[in-house]
Image (cartoon, rainbow, N blue to C red):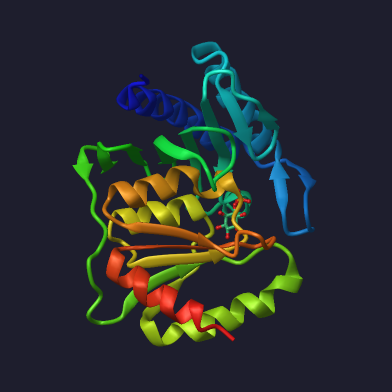
């Protein structure tokens, strides 16, 4: 039986170390390594170096566990556990010198398939903001020593967040979704790091979050944070290339889902 607290400690230790490396490299200046799916979808040298650090630490501490990382791909699990890692979530913010970026590390039971995995532990560390969000299955979600809970209701309208894919052909659809959802919202944020958006839902700093087309490493740790903080996370349209993820407290989640369900 794996101890989820020990897994959380390991995720936390490595996320801190990785975050400090990212911050150091940012202070030295960003080197763009490549573009990926589109010209807007960038990877920096630091993304690669930070992922390598995380991967090396995990293979030393947890040989045999599987791995899925944004930059270096995957390795199958021989133990039944898989680590799902975004070395720098919010790479565009990072490249522009904005503080809203984070290291996201999760460990799940099962393979690297969000449809079937069970989240066990996770850490989201924002090194410039100095904030560390952690969760372990059945043990709650935490910001440092403070236990987190999602907002139960949003009487003045929900403070929502979303994100947009890097592919410009998807923007019209995403904007149509925003238009549909705005009647529910008191306001809308687009912060640029899905892992932080989800951490903020867990912390009650946002009432809800929705985005299409996230990749597993963007939400693996953050989704566990939300559910451990009493929230609901769903992924729908999973057969499409851009599943819709919605995260919020139960009541607000139901409101968002009902609007999205009626999307034309
Ligand atoms: C991106 C961020 C962004 C979200 C994009 C993600 P990356 O991750 O989380 O907020 O809107 O969908 O791809 O590329 O910075 O790791």
Q: Is residue 203 left or right of residue 188?
A: left
Percent coordinates x, y for residue 2 in the rendering: 37, 21
Q: Residue at x 34, y 27 (%)?
A: 4
Marker count (numbered): 0
Percent coordinates x, y for residue 161 in the rendering: 44, 68
Q: Residue at x 40, y 71 (%)?
A: 160
Residue 147 vs residue 242, the one in the foreground: 242
Percent coordinates x, y for residue 44 in the rendering: 69, 41
Q: Which quadrant of the figure shows ligand 1?
A: bottom right
Q: Residue at x 78, y 54 (%)?
A: 37
58 to 156, vertically: above or below: above
Q: Residue at x 78, y 49 (%)?
A: 36
52 to 189, vertically: above or below: above
Residue 49 vs residue 3, the one in the foreground: 3
Quarter holding the N terminus is top left
Q: Quadrant of residue 150?
A: bottom left
Tell me, yes or no, if residue 99 can be seen here. Answer: no
Percent coordinates x, y for residue 206 in the rendering: 34, 64
């Amino acid at each position: 039986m794996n101890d989820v607290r020990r897994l959380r400690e390991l995720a936390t230790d490595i996320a801190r170390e990785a975050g400090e490396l990212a911050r150091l490299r940012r202070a030295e200046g960003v080197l763009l390594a490549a573009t990926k799916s589109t010209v807007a979808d960038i990877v920096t040298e630091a993304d690669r170096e930070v992922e390598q650090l995380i991967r090396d630490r995990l293979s030393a501490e947890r040989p045999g566990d599987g791995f899925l990382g944004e930059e270096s791909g995957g390795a199958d699990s021989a133990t039944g556990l898989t680590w799902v890692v975004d070395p720098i979530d919010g790479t565009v913010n990072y490249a522009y010198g904005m503080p809203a970026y984070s290291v996201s590390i999760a460990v799940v039971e099962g393979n690297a398939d969000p449809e079937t995995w069970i989240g066990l532990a996770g850490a989201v560390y924002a090194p410039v903001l100095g904030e560390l969000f952690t969760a372990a299955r059945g043990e709650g979600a935490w910001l440092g020593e403070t236990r987190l809970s999602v907002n139960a209701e949003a009487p003045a309208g929900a403070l929502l967040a979303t994100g947009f894919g890097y592919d410009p052909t998807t923007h019209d659809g995403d904007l149509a979704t925003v238009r549909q959802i705005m009647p529910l919202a008191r306001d809308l944020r687009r912060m640029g790091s899905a892992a932080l958006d989800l951490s903020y839902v867990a912390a009650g700093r946002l009432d809800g979050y929705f985005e299409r087309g996230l990749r597993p490493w963007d939400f693996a740790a953050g989704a566990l944070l939300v559910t451990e903080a009493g929230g609901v996370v769903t992924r729908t349209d999973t057969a499409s290339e851009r599943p819709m993820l919605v995260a919020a407290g139960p009541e607000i989640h139901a409101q968002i889902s009902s609007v999205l369900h009626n999307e034309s």
